[in-house]
Structures are given as structure tokens and as C-alpha cells.
Amino acid sequence: MIVEDISDSLRFPICHLYTNWDSKEKKECNITASWFVDGAGYMSAVADAIEAAKEEVFIADWWLSPEIYLKRPAIDGDYWRLDKLLQRKAKEGVKIFVLLYKELEMALGLNSYYSKQRLIEDSNDNIKVLRHPDHAKVGIFLWAHHEKIVVVDQMFAFLGGIDLCYGRWDDCKHRLTDLGSATPTVDISTLKKRTSSVPSGDAIYPIPAPYYSRFEPPETIVETASTPSEPSTPLPQLAPGDNLLMPNGQFTENMKGNTPEMERKNFLVSIKDGIKTKSKDFMKMMYTPHEMMVNEDEPDDDHQHDTTRVPEDIVNSLDGSAKFWIGKDYVNFIVKDFTNLDAPFDDFIDRITTPRMPWHDVAVCVQNATAKDVARHFIQRWNATKMEKAKFNNCYPYLLPKNYVDCSSKSSFSLSETSRITCQVLRSVSAWSCGFLEQDTVEQSIHEAYIDTITRSQHYIYIENQFFISLPHNNLNTRNQIAEALYNRILRAHKEDAVFRVYVVMPLLPGFEGEVGESSGASLHAITHWNYLSISSGKDSLLNRLKAAGIEDPSKYISFYGLRTHSTLNGEPITELIYVHSKLMIVDDKTVICGSANINDRSLIGKRDSEIAVIIEDEAFDDGMMNGSNFPSGRFAGSLRKRLFKEHLGLLGKESDTPTIDVTDPVDEYFYREIWYNIASLNTEFYEKVFHCIPSDNVATFFDLRKQQEEKPLYITELSRAEKMLESIQGHLVLLPLNFLCKESLTPTAGTVEGIMPTSLWT
């Protein structure tokens, strides 16, 4: 009977949740919710919620790294390490269910099998892990499960853009370095820096003489833990008996190791080196009868993976400073991709020469009935995977959702800052990803909610997203209508002569390993091409369409930005972009859409990657302003928008000072032009002069790029002047350079691996 009920639930979308997000009876009212900016607060809250779990924990991730530390620095040893936390709760009797995206190994190296094995060992059989899809069996090779979900006791649901994996933990300081007590073992005067923002080229700039006199003795060289504009936060004091986690300093450079990519990274980057050796395995997988009845407790791959246990003796000395990013967690995705994931505490990035790439993200926690809705999405996916892969394996149970009758929380876990909201769960799912029995059933409620919310917006739209790939409805390269909705809304404001603003914050460069202007950067070039084609390049771009419609200066209505920071490494100025990974839209200080979906077809049209999000509308308001007039500001949406503005403008931690910048009114002409845009413009100018960093509007061709590489930047030629400019930088906000490589074709070259892949891979 239960199996029949499960089958019925897979026939259609969960109608109570998703048929029409705007139907009043489908929304959940009087929900409690909290937001998180950056991974530190999010992971800490997730850790506390799991620690308080009484019955069950659901986790669904695109990538999960078992050895990440949810609270940092790790002064409690491995107590808050994810795998140890889950195993500890499992031994207490809590049932833990984990859904992982099963990568196509010849293209991605997420090593989800390793993650699974690390989780289930010593778990007292209470941790169950399923991986999906089996690519040959279901014919899915290009798409992924992209949700990031943690649900505790079906009462607390965390979701957004943050996977529980390497590289995601960060805070508002977005530190570039993390040396701890490490000291250089080579002559630092000959070191060649590696960053995504300053391509290596052929020149190695010597460190000028003035730096040597400023160096402390090598044994005292430590990291600059924060940007000059923000005070550093002292590390917690160690109490007697505390164990301090220190990393293994050994570097491993085995490039044949598993290579997880950063969010949808070039689907076939690794094929270039491995296609010949792996093609036989791939063909075998394609044509051999595969997993009619899978025992998920055994390896279902064609080869054994190395599941060497992580040594426990790394929790050792109290000497030196604690590190925030241990081993593989210290990453710079564009400079170098991951290697040897089964050695989690071994560095693969040289901290002495390479800054980490900071990570900016947003997530939410919803409670009560909406948490049960998120749980039902997980349960639907779990049961579908169980039926497909382990139908007759009793080790993997079917899951049943809790009812909505009693939504009161009896948990000891609580969040200090919450808001009362109305909420609806949104999804991008189809038969392959969610198990619908009707193959043509597709849900794209995230896309529909975006379009409707943009259309209904009154004063402003604030977007943070990893991508911006969206073209007009008559362009066959993309199907999502985000750009079309923005175009129509801005055109309406122009015709009405109304003040209306659209802010878009996105990464300065896509997070793909490679170097701009080199063959290694083919994937990076391809995504850059589609982003700029959507924004500013060609007649179908959003900005050029607005100009063609009679708007001489589209920046009056819409503008695009990125994030960047700077610090010092070995006494030398360095810069790196802050990678924007959020999937967020805030509208009019009263509506928020937050989840895992990017602005591209992969995330939005339902048939491709699976995604989850929530649309939140405030029920409680404070006094606010819009274009100089009183306007209610939602306690959830308004506070989140103000928190983000303060971080990007460098205002956090300065509340005790006399405020010089008021972020209350996001529409006001003075704030929009003289504060937000002006700070971004000046920051951009200073960074380009000091570092010659890319992307830049000064680089329209690859020849321009090479020429810029050959010129010494200001921090080399005029150090004191460069330092004064860096001191003038406010926050992290910079302009997205809309003319970067505008005279070059960035589409993949015919005959290359990237060139033979379908357009849908990139869009």
C-alpha cells in the first residue's frame, strides 16, 4: 500500500505546493524565517540545528565535502566537522538521509562516492546516502541535481546557494589569505603571484627594494586577515584542554586526482586530458546492462575508489594561529581546480603565492509548514531514487512526510533573529529529476515566480546571481524570460517617467579554471560570451534593446556590478575578485526569492537541472523610504537588502561611528548615483590603476590584454601612491566592465571539446 501511495505521489507535482505559486490557498502564512549572508553564519546555524535534531535530518547537495568544519576556527577539534557531527547524531539514534548528485566521472570529479563512503562509515547504519542519476540508465548526461537543502525534523529547512562543501565558508571580511603560522620557505623576492585578476603572462615582477625593509623576520610573518578598511576580528582564546585543528602542510600536485568544479564548471574540461583513457570505460557504461537492482551499499562504479581514511593526528599542536580554511578548503577556483579529494587536509593551493577566492552567498531558514514543504520535496526525490535504484533493497526505506496539523516546534534549536512572513516553495523539476511518472510533466515555478515578481515590482529590483544568461523571447538560444521581463518593466517605467532601479551584482569572471586569453580559458570565455551577449553585446542584449527603444542612458534604470577585495601577501599588495554565488532577488523591500536557481536555462526551464527556492513576502513592516517618500519596509526583505548594501559599501562594523551613508532609500537619485554608483566607479578606477586587474574596460582585445600584462602596475612603480589609492577603496563594490573583450569572439573554437558541445550546456 505504501509503495502504491509513493507511486501516486510521483505522478504529478505536489499540488499543495507548486501548481500555481500565486494562488492564495497554496501559500503558507505566519511562517518564521531567517536569512544568512555568507557561509559562516549559515553553516554555524546548520550545525546547531543538526546538533539539536531528535528524529531525522535530510541533506541534498550538488556537492558535499564530509570533512568541512561548520564552525571556525576549529578550536573544538573535529567536534563541528560535518562527517563527525552526522555520525555522532546517528549513534544517538537520529536517522540521516543524504541525496547527492552523482556526477559523470569522466567530466566532473566531485567524487560523490568518496563522500558517501566517508559518511556511512561508523554510522551505526543510521546514515543512508543515495546518489543520482545513473547516467546511462536514465540518459541524463548534461544536467545535475543542484539543490542545497538541510531539513531537521521536518521543522527547520535551510536552503539557498550554499553547498556543504569546500570553498563555501566565508564571512563579510572575505579574507584573501590564511597563512596561520606558516612561513615562506623560498626567496619571496622571486615569487610569482597567481590570481584570476592578474593573468600571469610572461613577466615576473620583482618585489621592489622598499618591501624588504618593511618585512618582519620570516618567523613572524603572518597573514593579513582582513582588508585594510575593516578591523580584524581576534580569534577566540584557547581554554585549557582545547584542541586546535592545524592542517597538514604537505602540498599535493597530482593532477590526475578528482577535480570537483565550481558550480557547473566546464562540463568537459577534464575530458581534454582524459578522453582517450576513459573512452572505453564510457562506452562500456553506455552499452552494458546497468544496475537492474542496485545494492547502494556497494560501489556501483566500474572501478574502486580510494577511500583512505583521513588521519586523525592532524589535531595536534596549539602553536601558531588557527586557520579558517584547512587543506582543500583553501581554494581559488580560477587559478587551479581541485586535486586529490581523498586527502582533505593536504593543501593543493600554495598559500604563499596564491590568495584564496572569497565566496559571497545568501541562504535562508524557513520553519513551520514551509519546512514541511521543503521536506516533501526531499522525500519525493528520495522515494523516486529509491524506486529507481534500490527498489528491493530494504536497507533504504521509503520516507513519509509529516502532516501539517501540528507545526509547532518542540526543538531546542532556535534562531535569534527571525521575521514573520508568507512563504511558498518553488521548484525546477521534471521526470528525470523528481520521478514524475508522466514524462512530459515539468514544473518551472521558480521561473514563473521571477517573471511575475519582476512584472509586479513598483520601485526597485535587486539581483545577486552567479550568471545572467537570458535573451529575448524571439532568440532561440535561450528560453527563460528574465531579461524580457526586465526589459518590459524598465520600458514601462520609462514611458511613465517613473523612477525605477534595477541593481544586478554578479561575478566579475565565471568560476572556471583557466586563464583569460589562453587556450585553458575556453570554458571561461564561453560563459563570459553568454553573459555579455545577454547584458551588453549585440542587438539582442538587454542594454542595447533598451537603447533601441529610446532610452539613451539605460544606467538610469539598470546597472551591473561585481565584488572585489585586496590585502597583502608576503608584504605585497594583492587583489582578487569575490565570487558572487547568490541566487537572490529582492523587490521593493517586501518580496524575496532565494534558492539554488541561477539566471539561465539550466536552472529555470524545469527540464534540466533540478532546483528549489522560496518566495517570501513580509507580514511585518518598519518605516522605510522609496524615492524620498514614506514606504513600508519589510522586516525580512528590507533588513536583508540593507545588510547586503552595508557589506558591499564597507559599512559593516561602523555603526558606532556617525553614519555618513544612509541605505534606507535604494531608489533615491543621490544614493543611486552619488553613493552606490560613485563608490563602485572609484573602486574600479583604483583597482585598475594599482593592479592592472581584469576584467577591465581597458581590455577590448587579446592584444590589449597582452599589452597590459607587459606594463608594470602602480604598486610596482609607485608603491606609496598605490597604497594611498588602496586606502581610499570603500567596501567591495566595483563596476562590471561591459566592454571587456568586446572586440573578440569568445565562443568556443570549432573542433575543440568546448566547441562540439551543445549550446544548452552553457546556457
Image (spheres, rainbow, N blue to C red):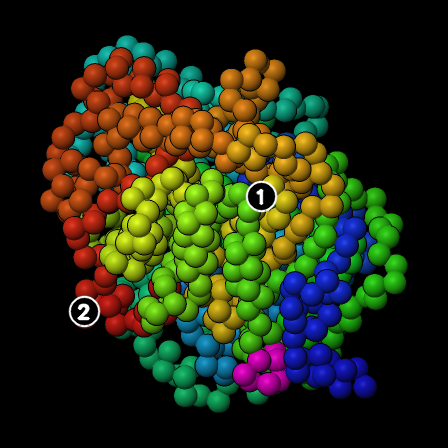
Res 565 visible? no
In the rendered picture of this protein, how many numbered marks are placed on residues? 2
Query: Circle 2 sits on which residue?
Result: 750
Q: Quadrant of the N terminus?
A: bottom right
**Badge nearest the viewer, 1 or 2:** 1
Residue at horizontal 16%, vertical 35%?
708
Q: Which residues are magenta?
A: 435-441
Question: Label for residue 57?
Answer: none
Q: Is residue 88 above or below residue 347?
A: below
Residue at the spot 45% in from the left edge and 27% down from the top edge:
670
Of the numbered discs 1 and 2, the one sitting upstream in the chain is: 1
Q: Is residue 530 above or below residue 244?
A: below
Neighbor class of circle 2 (other Cα within 10 Å; few <14, some 14-19, many 20+) is: few
Task: Give the percent coordinates (x, y) of residue 690.
Answer: 26, 25
100 relative to 92 in the view: left or right: left
The quadrant holding residue 218 is top left
Q: According to the image, label 1 marks what residue?
A: 588
Q: Are marks 1 and 2 in contact (CB under 8 Å)?
A: no
Residue 633 is situated, as x and y percent measured from the top left of the image, at 65, 37
| Residue drawn at point x = 34 percent, y = 70 percent | 474
Instruction: Say which of 193 and 91 sits in front.
Output: 193
User: The disc labelled 1 sits on which kind of residue?
Assistant: Asp
SS category of the residue bearing label 2: loop
Residue 265 falls within the magenta-colored stretch: no
Which image quarter: residue 732? top left
Residue 437 sits inside the magenta stretch: yes
